[in-house]
Amino acid sequence: MLLNFDRLGWWKLVLIGITLLTAAFLLLPILFIAALSFGSSQWLIFPPPGWTLKWYQELLADPRWLESAWTSFQIAIIVTVLSVLLGLVTSFGLTRGRFMFREALKALFLTPMILPVVVLAVALYAFFLQIGLNGTLTGFVISHLVLALPFSILSITNALEGFDKSIEDAAVLCGASPFEAKIRVTLPAISHGIFSAAIFSFLTSWDEVVVAIFMASPTLQTLPVKVWATLRQDLTPVVAAASTLLILLTVLLMVLVALVRKGLKS
Amino acid sequence: MSKPFLQIRGIRKEYGPVTAVHDVNLDVAQGEFLTFLGPSGSGKSTTLYILAGFEAPTRGDILLNGETLLSTPSHKRNIGMVFQRYTLFPHLTVGENIAFPLKVRRLPKAEIDAKVRDMLKLVRLEGFEDRKPAQMSGGQQQRVALARALAYDPPVLLMDEPLSALDKKLREEIQHEIRRIHQQTEVTILYVTHDQEEALRLSDRIAVFSKGVIDQIGTGPELYANPATRFVAEFIGDSDFLPCDLVTAANGKAEIALAGTTVIPNVPVHGKPVAGGKAALMLRPERLRLMRSAPGGATAVPVTISDITFLGNNIHVATETARGDALAVRLPFGHEAISSLSRGDSVWLGFDPASAHVFC
Amino acid sequence: MLSRTDARAPGSKAPAYRLRLTDFDLTLPALGLLVLFFVVPVAILLARSVSEPVPGLGNYAELLGSSTYLRIFANTFIVSGLVTLVSLLIGFPVAWALAIMPSRLASVVFAILLLSMWTNLLARTYAWMVLLQRTGVINKMLIALGLIDKPLPLVNNLTGVTIGMTYIMLPFIILPLYGVIRKIDPAILQAAALCGANRWQALVRVLLPLAMPGMAAGALMVFVMSLGYFVTPALLGGTANMMLAELIAQFVQSLVNWGMGGAAALVLLVVTLALYAVQLRFFGTDRMGGR
């Protein structure tokens, strides 16, 4: 009866209570930041003594914020495209292949996801210092690609494993060349996996801080690096404004995901 | 048979040390409905996949109208196929699924539309063209798959256990559909199944596969009346087997001894008979006569009844010989057994030696 | 290539449609990327730990022989352990509730989980920096409630790190655990009840053991992630309470001591891989993480 919601009795109230408290614990800090970003207090007093938009004005007036956001966006988009393309090709190889060490190879592809980022950050930093990629867009893209690729491979491999190869075979017997069958039948059928791969890759790059801190140069920094550098100095409400915009972006992304999922289902 | 339309010549398929198909030879006539019947792992599906081009044979050749198929890639073989699993393209509607092979052939739109309508009519799914596969039952999906496979008028249609995912009633219904469509289109069909009833119901001829080899090819009645191997006898129809000793054998007939004493002459014999060797006598449960007392002159085996089961249109009587061999008998409903016989009764099972078989 | 294609007898012509590329070849670009920009740099870094400034194990001796560094290791393990424990204690009931509650309510909680996970890490950490500061809302509330007289030091110490990390790690334990509990057939618990088990017995003897693989996998993932976490400890912990990832960064960035940096990185890697090996050994290749 423990898995029957209606027959839990007073345990039900306890479970619901814990769940709602946890949900509040997860949600309130986010709402709190959004509220503070409109508060007039320089010292982030809550509840704010008055309301203002000046932190947003300050944020938008500073070209370094906008530049870093633009840099982040460029990197994230390039990483997303490369990660999905590379993820697709690799996943086909991993899912369809019957070669030795396939499982080991798969594990290797997923390792950057589970190893501490700081190790990769330090290692790449040293490596890029030597080959002159530090502080370059290419350097950012490569390092974020290494971090994003596992998510892409995982999403697409999952989708491909759930896709019955017979359907692709059927398309081939219908007269489509193996490549045409993949484009016209397999890709549409695994589009949900490709979409997840894109979202995860984008978020991985867009939110990435640790590698970026090492990779950044005075002339090229991403948005998280800018936030990080600002936070290391003081707790200015401008960061609250920036954070609120980032939260807004997350909400938009979630709505997009929900819409696409719905679209894919019907 | 008319001139061979499709010829399978010594096809062999090895996976490393395992040989899945052993030198299969087969001629198929145009318009024929030929079924590969056998248990899983008998090589029937592998042979079909070689025909489709998804597997390359280790050796051998396949000729269609006298020309080899093996150098043609799958997508240019122009062969139709219905798979065991549902393989409709999930993102396309029924109409788009059927149109798919025509679109990749770049046919004009009007022609495609007309063909899609014809095909929907053929499988009796008019009005379903805008449905997505997910909105249809398994039986409907397989009918669409059939329509899609036939849309480009393939010379050969391959069907790989297309009904195995459906329940019994639906299966029978679609078997009728397949028969009708075969008669209507006159397409040559190669059908794979492990279900003897399905094979008997659909096919012109059946090729019985066992361990990568075709044991026997023939029409259903031929296989039933004259099984070439014990395996075929077991696979087509029900069968009882009694161990026996071979006394003499000549010209396909044997004299055997049952339980050391009863000598039965003139039984058709298969395999490599060796006088004095061990053999198995095959009897059909539905052709055994149950008698209460020892028959004068007729061939019969004394047995004890171990169980009686009522199965609707017939009665299944399980019996045992004095040596402990099991013999099943099937009696029509209304036979006296239902009322007057009971477990433990001693009876005689009579049979006609000419309809029995001995396998060595 | 290392790959094997279908065995084909010599002389039999390979069908023309087969691409020359084998499936293994398809993985080569990604493999190249990974080897060049992951395996090689990490290997170089680790190599430097035994070659700089002089060849030998001097860096490791220093790292494992100094009380300063040992305290950092201790901090790291204590905080990671605490975060894991608290996440489990909160995560299990939440995952359980999510698995059985009406789907409408569950989807609201899921949306919150997702929002929290997907919101920028720095934004979330920033929120806790503000909330936990001396003049922050939490201290004010506690004073207003009369629970304390003067503000508690909640930030720039391990308390702050633990709270902030738990906040970040919770979804990583709830989601996999939800998946595991969701897959348990309710009939098993009905059977337990019919066998005479009361609720506590059913919970302790049936539900918890069945959820154990998920709990263990989730706990291990959270523990390992916490061990190597950099951002949150750096912002909420302050300089006096460093954790391992910060130490590595500091060796490299401020001290430019690649030898020590590499040594510390190796320690972190070895612990991480050892823990994953334990997980693989005892719980199979259950899916690792995801976001």
Image (spheres, coloured by chain):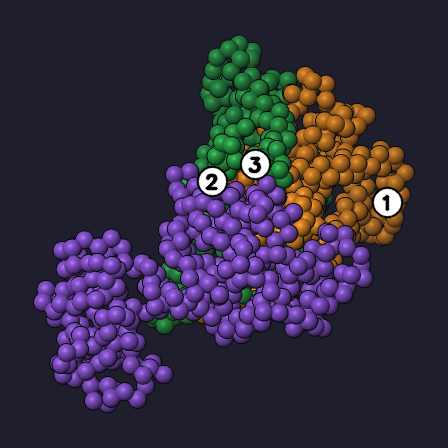
Residue B353, image x and y in percent? 23, 70
Mark 3 is surrounded, within 10 Å at the Cα level, by few (under 14), some (14 to 19) or many (20 or more) other residues, namely: some
> Which residue is outermost to the left?
B261
Of residues C22 and C186, the one nearer the viewer is C22
Q: Residue at x 46, y 47 (%)?
A: C216
> Which residue is outermost to the top?
C54
Residue C102, image x and y in percent? 59, 68
Report whether residue C172 is seen. no
Q: Which mark is residue C14?
A: 3
Distance from Cα at disc 1 to Cα at disc 2: 75 Å
Nearer to us: label 3 or label 2 = 2
For chain C, give the colour: green
Q: Chain of mark 1?
A: A
Element under label 1? helix
Q: Which mark is residue B59?
A: 2
The chain in orange:
A
Q: Chain of mark 2?
A: B
Element under label 3? loop
